Amino acid sequence: MIERDFDVPFVADLALREKQIQQNYRPVVAVHKWFARRPGTLFRALLLSEFLEGPLREQFYRGQSLKHLRVLDPFMGGGTTLLEANRVGCSVTGFDINPMAWWIVRQEIGELNPRAYRVAADTLRDTLESEIGHLYRTQCRECGARDAHVKYFLWVKSPPCAKCRQPVDLFPNYLVAADVRHPTNLFVCRDCGELYDSPARKNPPGCPHCKTRFSVEFTARRNRCKCKHCGHVNAYPTPEGGPPPHRMFAIEYHCERCRPAHSGRFFKKPAPADLRRYDEAAARLAAGEARFIPQEEIPPGDETDRLHRWGYRFYREMFNARQLLGLELLCHAIKRQKDSRIADALATNLSDLVRYQNLLCRYDTKALKSLDVFSVHGFPVGLIQCESNVLGISGKAMAVGSGGWLNIVDKFAKAKAYCRHPFEIRHEGRRKVRVPILTEWIGDQRNDLHPPETKEVALACADASEADFTGRKFDAILTDPPYFQNVQYAELMDFCYVWLRKLVKAAHPEFDGLTTRHTNELTGNVSMGRTLEHFTEGISRVFRRMAKALNPGAPLAFTYHHNSLDAYLPVAVAMLDSGLACSASLPCPAEMGASIHINGTVSSIVDTVFVCRSTGKFPRRWLADTPAALARVAAGDLRLLEQGQMKPTQGDMRCVVFGHLIRLAVWRLRPTWVATPKAADRMAAVRRWIIKFGGADAVLQELGDAYARARAEQQWELNEEDKAFRTSTDEISF
């Protein structure tokens, strides 16, 4: 059982490593972007802990067969839980209200002939190379060759000055590339536009070409920018003027001839020929019929309102002419593909490519690469845009640069290869050893086996709260539900959906709607009136339905974290409404601390794994009657995380405590719980119990004092009372 056999240090270590570069540990995630995927290692560990005997550390690296089990995920999202269950042979059922989630999981788990797919994808690229490849060429500054491949075109927003009407370049600074992956710092001159080097990043010398001194006087700061022509201070953005114009100011390119003897990256100021190539793309786009370019308006929303503030009203306005031309031609080629599974795979590639081929992509001046539009799980409208080569550049060992068709296809092919031959990575000291997991595979069928094999896979684009499970029972429900207001899944995925819909709606009624937005989506959203109460009622409906679908004693295990304790109240209410007991709250790292959307914030990277059952047992020591006693339980969790090579932060400590408080509240309130009052009243009942117990601050104070002392002494010595408390095997049945 999970409560007894889940190995926190082992799983924490694996999860931390996986989240550093998830597609190296679980390449299947590269089929298509989804948000905040939990570690696959976590859900594999939950399955094996629940259904197998013996130490998890031994079972984890063995091929497993759990063909007799049925697993359900009512919020399948990117499909992590279903993929892990399907891999070990379980029959899987998944629901998600968002058609993009349904489509992504369908592509991850569907059988695909890898050789036929690769031939089709490469043929498509070759066709486009002959049509528009020249639009991504430039002349090398070093050798003069005219066929160097452009990696990235860099653009700056350049709206007209409100006074003199001259363009105002909204440079946040003049740094093009930092001396991290480049030998020196590279700057652009605000006057002549030439690029120049400097060893100093903060106070570089003036431009050696025009002698203009370096100054931040004309940089864009706090939504203001001074015009270099007339001195007028302009405010931005100005949505009434529509989307802001852009000016190409730099190119990063790749020259195969010069590469062996060249230090650093290749940069240049755009030449007239480079500007003419863009004009050619714009003219060609204007002359053709745009069958696949989306014409939909961007609806208002918590995230999309950011776009409206910059004057964007239509999705097509977030792409430049060359990007639109390339995407349109790709769509035409995909529609000509006759094999339906390969056509669907290529359409998925196009949808994933869109997040790199748009005017919201930024350029990372340190990593020297394009940042996709969803790098911060939102719509960041930066001042500098990065246009990637839509085709991608083929290198000797791997693709050069990022954000091109070749990059997307390479990752997709590796993802599907992993599905046929999954593996785990074992760490032996500093060595990473890939361990093939023989007998396991991911998919609905394997036509290359003799005889062919199939697995039961049932995926539905539907609201799980309305699912009919008559005559069907499940051995486990594993899920990663929405976390109130953390990610606006529908608003973000519409960006890809409006393109993908053009390609697949004829064969898939799930794409009939103009948007992925749904009133029953369980993510807080101010613009749609989805409050905490709406979230509570929705997740409660799902949990009540799921509880009825479980076999007696089977687990409902789900992950959750939030910075606010109030956001935990809905899941407490959902557990109580379902009638299930919360038998465990286990910590596990689920995010990468260095992620752009987390780094430098107070957010935690630790999830609580809540385990709920109708009957079962758990250690008596997990119950606590005082904040001090609960702090001891939480301290034990922190120690286990440390054994898993994690260094818990204040945010992590907070989330661990929140998880235990919610578990205890559910346990204490369950015997007398009445699910009839309004959601606000039910949340208030949970909140009152937490306050009566002493509150989160009291537990955190007790925990903080003990943890600070232990860290200061560089040890974690337990007294005899604590040792007895932690090692007790006395269990409570329910």
Image (cartoon, grey):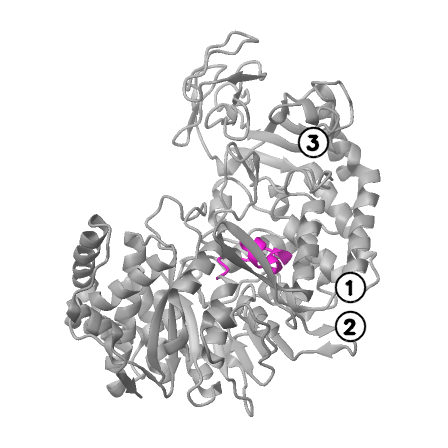
Q: Residue at x 73, y 62 (%)?
A: 344
**Towards the viewer: 231 or 63:** 63
Task: Return the disc, 3 or 2, that comes first in the chain's sequence.
Answer: 3
Per the rendering, the mark at residue 447 is 2
Q: Residue 202's spot in the image, x, y percent?
A: 41, 21
Per the rendering, the mark at residue 611 is none
Task: Judge whether residue 101 can be spotted in this image.
Answer: yes
Q: Secondary structure at mark 1?
A: loop
- Residue 459 horizontal side relative to residue 239, left or right: right
Q: Residue at x 29, y 74 (%)?
A: 663
- For discs 3 and 2, the disc positioned in front in the rendered view: 2
Of all residues shown, which one is farthest toward the front? Answer: 429
Kind of residue sitting beneath label 2: Asn
- Residue 160 horizontal side relative to residue 329, left or right: left
Q: Are marks 1 and 2 in contact (CB under 8 Å)?
A: yes
Q: Secondary structure at mark 3?
A: strand
Quadrant containing the N terminus is bottom left
Per the rendering, the mark at residue 113 is 1
